[in-house]
Amino acid sequence: MHVHHFARMAACVAALALLAGCAPKSYSVRHPAPSEQLVFGISAPATTLALVDARPGAGRAFSSGILPAALTVDGAPLDAAGYLASNLQAELVARGLPTQVDLGGTALPTLELTAFRMQNHRANGFSPFVTLTFLSGDLVTPEGKQRLGVFVKRGKVPVWSFDEVVEPTFNQPLSLAIKELAAKIAARLHGARSSDADVDRLVKKIATRGDDSYLDVYALGFTNNPTAIGPMAVLARDPDEYVRLAAISSLGTLGAVDQLELLTSIYRDGTLWQDRAMALKAIGDLDSPAADAFLAAEHAALEARAGDKEVDWTLQVVRLYR
């Protein structure tokens, strides 16, 4: 009896060691490089945006998951609100919008931060290390309040060491989340969009395909230019997983309300969880009566099935918009 008990314990310890694969207890991340060659072609007034950290107490832990890992930046623990404020400001300024993002304050416009965190997962020692990045907040202006959400999924199989996961699963999602939020704020505060020439340049670059083409697809979405919707709808069926996810997400960023049927079909028929989850994220972005009704119905259906891992992950995406 005792022999079997110790054998089971040994097996569990071995499985945990294989899963962790010598994963470090902390990772050092960097500040995103602001966008280049995507300056908005408008003359916007100097704007001060107040960022208020309204995350609930239970939602203030930035890094969580199956492999616990703290994140540091500039040699200190990552402060989510401060990191977001400084890098959001850098991105908006780089895109030609003179903006100061202050932590705290009551003057409008205000971004009330409701979620900003990264969750990791790994099924076994041979599978990808995956991060799910969640970001949401209410943009408050004299006209009212509007929910903005961001969801990014990335994964990487560490071959030689866990250092290999830092860039693709931490730095890139953090950069994309901040750039997407900046694009959405720019659209809502200033009606800002990039030129048709920028859209054409990116579409041509994506057609040549490289290892980081999915980043160009995201950049195409960050143009806020509706002429990007047609090419993006085609890319939403692309065989390359990360190109496809970037395109599905970007249909939401672009506010492609005419693509609701495509997004609901991806959600209904997608064979991969990440496709379905990203489609729901994009539907949440659309902020139209039909999209909101669809999201509300799915929220209720998902809550009735809570307890399943993928259902619970999907609920986290839906709750960014509720």
Image (cartoon, rainbow, N blue to C red):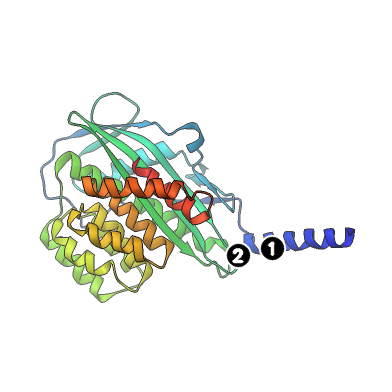
Q: Residues within 10 Å of mark 2 (few under 14, many from 20)?
A: some
| Residue wearing tag 2 | 124
Amino acid under disc 1: Ala
Horizontally, is 256 left or right of 236 in the view?
A: left
- Asked if disc 1 and disc 2 are in contact, CB closer than 8 Å, the reply is yes
User: Residue 135 or 201: which is nearer the viewer?
Assistant: 135
User: Residue 143 or 211: which is nearer the viewer?
Assistant: 143
Which label belongs to residue 110? Answer: none
The residue under the point 17% across, 57% down is: 258
Relative to 191, say whether 197 is above or below. Answer: below
Query: Quadrant of the rendered structure where residue 248 is?
Result: bottom left
Q: Position of residue 21 (x, y in %)?
A: 63, 63
Horizontally, is 275 left or right of 46 in the view?
A: right
Q: Quadrant of the N terminus?
A: bottom right
The residue under the point 51% across, 39% down is: 61
Query: Quadrant of the rendered structure where residue 146 is?
Result: top left
Relative to 118, say whether 265 is above or below. Answer: below
Q: Position of residue 156 (x, y in %)?
A: 49, 65
Amino acid under disc 2: Asn
Relative to 179, say whether 110 is above or below. Answer: above
**Residue at the outermost right position:** 2
The residue under the point 68% across, 59% down is: 16
The residue under the point 37% across, 60% down is: 276
Label 1 sits on a secondary structure element that is helix
| Residue wearing tag 1 | 15
Q: Quadrant of the C terminus?
A: top left
Distance, label 1 to label 2, CA atoms, is 8 Å
Q: Is residue 288 visible?
A: no
